[in-house]
Image (spheres, helix red, strand yellow):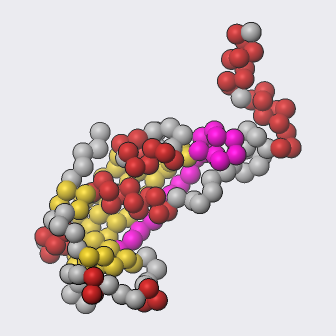
Amino acid sequence: MFVDLTFDPLRFTSLKQEHTGSCLAGDLPGLAAYLHSKQGVVDYTVKGFVNENNMPVIEVTVSAKLDLICQRCLAGLQSNVSSKTRLILVKDEKNLPEVEDEIEGEDVIVTPQTMSLMQLIEEEILLALPITSVHDSEQCHRSDLNLDSANKANPFQVLKNLKS
Ligand SMILES: [Zn+2]
């Protein structure tokens, strides 16, 4: 069971602290809408440091094996998701960059009073989820080419047939 932690981001970065661990996808409520089952595993590292420009940085790295939902047949779809983002903390909105200055993999945000470890992990995974998740056509239970064999392979259909 994943226990959330809230921390003061400035203290976290100045002390160069780090949280590393793993949890089940089902422990992250923000992912529930995207999951076929809660069995996926999420490895995470949240690291604080001060960069070469003397800016506090929170680096979030996630690597997850998730059981997503195929948008064509609604069955489980194993997907690997990994992502890393550096959140650069600034004092106020005046310090936010113009949109064109944004750097891939970096995000400049106004320093919040507290941060939630769980929220950081959830947001990083949500950003990295594929826009559309579907099986390859050979693996999909609803490939239009072989609907018949897909029905045979569907355990719910088999169950239904047994009952009737
Ligand atoms: Zn499918």
Q: Quadrant of residue 14?
A: bottom left
- Residue 15: x and y, percent? 13, 71
> What residue is at 27 percent from the left and 87 percent from the top?
94
Q: Quadrant of residue 110?
A: bottom left
Say which quadrant the C terminus sits in.
Answer: top right
Q: Is residue 131 magenta?
A: no
Q: Is residue 95 shown to the viewer in this render?
A: yes
- Residue 80: x and y, percent? 53, 54
Judged left or right of residue 131, residue 153 is right
> What residue is at 39 percent from the left and 60 percent from the top?
123
Q: Quadrant of residue 147?
A: top right
Residue found at the far front of this picture = 93
Above or below 86: residue 153: above
Which residues are the magenta region?
69-86
> What residue is at 29 percent from the left and 63 percent from the top?
46
Above or below 90: residue 80: above
Above or below 130: residue 74: above
How many labels sit on residues?
Answer: 0
- The majority secondary structure of the magenta stretch comes to strand
- Residue 92: x and y, percent? 23, 81
> What residue is at 60 percent from the left and 40 percent from the top?
76
